[in-house]
Amino acid sequence: MEKFDVIIIGAGPAGLTAAIYLGRNNASVAFIEGKVPGGKMPEQSKIENYPGFDLISGVELSNRMLMQARENKAKFIFGNVSHIENISDHEKEVTLENGNKYLAKVIIIASGMKNVVPLDVVNIEKFNGRGVSYCAICDGAIYLSKPCAIIGGGNSAFDEAPFLASVASEVHIFVRDGIIAEKKLVDDVKKIKNITIHENSKILELKGDNKVESIIANIDGKVQEMDIKGVFPYVGFKPATSFITNKEIMNSRGFIQVDKNMETKIKNIFAIGDVVEKDIRQITTATSDGTIAAKVIGSRINMD
């Protein structure tokens, strides 16, 4: 069984930062990710608040972090974690869904968050991947010159809208409980001619045979059918912690509780990034978490 000093679960900005620091400290590091590395960053068409860059795409920033982690000898293992076992203070076992197992002295949980599915929309799960997508940057090109809809009134919805509008024939944003996105994002969206914002409105049902062909929506109290081929829900996120069996390290909402060193109640199991119980979740706060955990872990490994 392959063994590492540190195994990082997740390859978002927090996990990749930790991998960079630990690799530079000559620790043997592996990071496990079952999707495109970068966490939520690849889903952002542009990032304008990351220090050092006036503007950079989420894909490019993700790739830069990934390359730097690999240059510092961190090993990328593709897969999804099934569960982790705390064998002892200095030995942990990580099992993947494919059955592969790995050992580590320390585990860092950097699994981030996953999209909330708006289950009140009829057929939302039925059409997942066949007209329903949670990433406009990833799948927007599929809907070239086709009408699309976005569900949500927060930053994610309004951040994705301009890119989707650049490929789709028209974009309809359905906002049920009021717009909460940053003013600049909203102002930018309002300038785009092929985007329509429907406040006090919601999508009730998706219709079609093998893929989404239309939607039933309630717009200002009037129910109507609309020709929509792609639906992008952005109604929030929840922590990606389903693989954690020890619920004592989590709060009632599933976020992981840590101390000032980013360590959980279990010795040598750390958690960083959006999966942690906190008030502010940004790329910069994620990289900060990764730095703190890596420095603490690095000093321990050097003392062993």
Image (tube, rainbow, N blue to C red):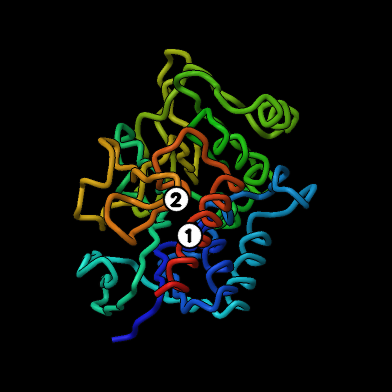
Using the image as rendered, state which of residue 49 and residue 36 is in the foreground: 49
Distance Cα–Cα, label 1 vs label 2: 7 Å
Q: In the rendered view, does 252 fall on the left or right side of 10?
A: left
Measured from the top left, where is residue 252 in percent x and y?
Answer: 25, 35
Q: In the rendered view, does 222 fall on the left or right side of 105?
A: right
Instruction: Name the amino acid type tagged 1.
Output: Val
Using the image as rendered, state which of residue 186 and residue 88 is in the foreground: 88
Find disc 2 in the rendering and name its residue. 261
Measured from the top left, where is residue 201 in percent x and y?
Answer: 46, 21
Measured from the top left, where is residue 206 in percent x and y?
Answer: 37, 39
Using the image as rendered, state which of residue 117 and residue 277 is in the foreground: 277
Q: In the rendered view, does 162 fall on the left or right side of 206?
A: right
Find disc 1 in the rendering and name its residue. 296
* Numbered badge on residue 256: none
Measured from the top left, where is residue 21 in percent x and y?
Answer: 57, 66
Callouts 1 and 2 close, C-beta under 8 Å: yes
Using the image as rendered, state which of residue 191 and residue 271 is in the foreground: 271
Which residue in the rendered view is the most extreme toward the right? 54
Specify whether residue 96 is in view: no
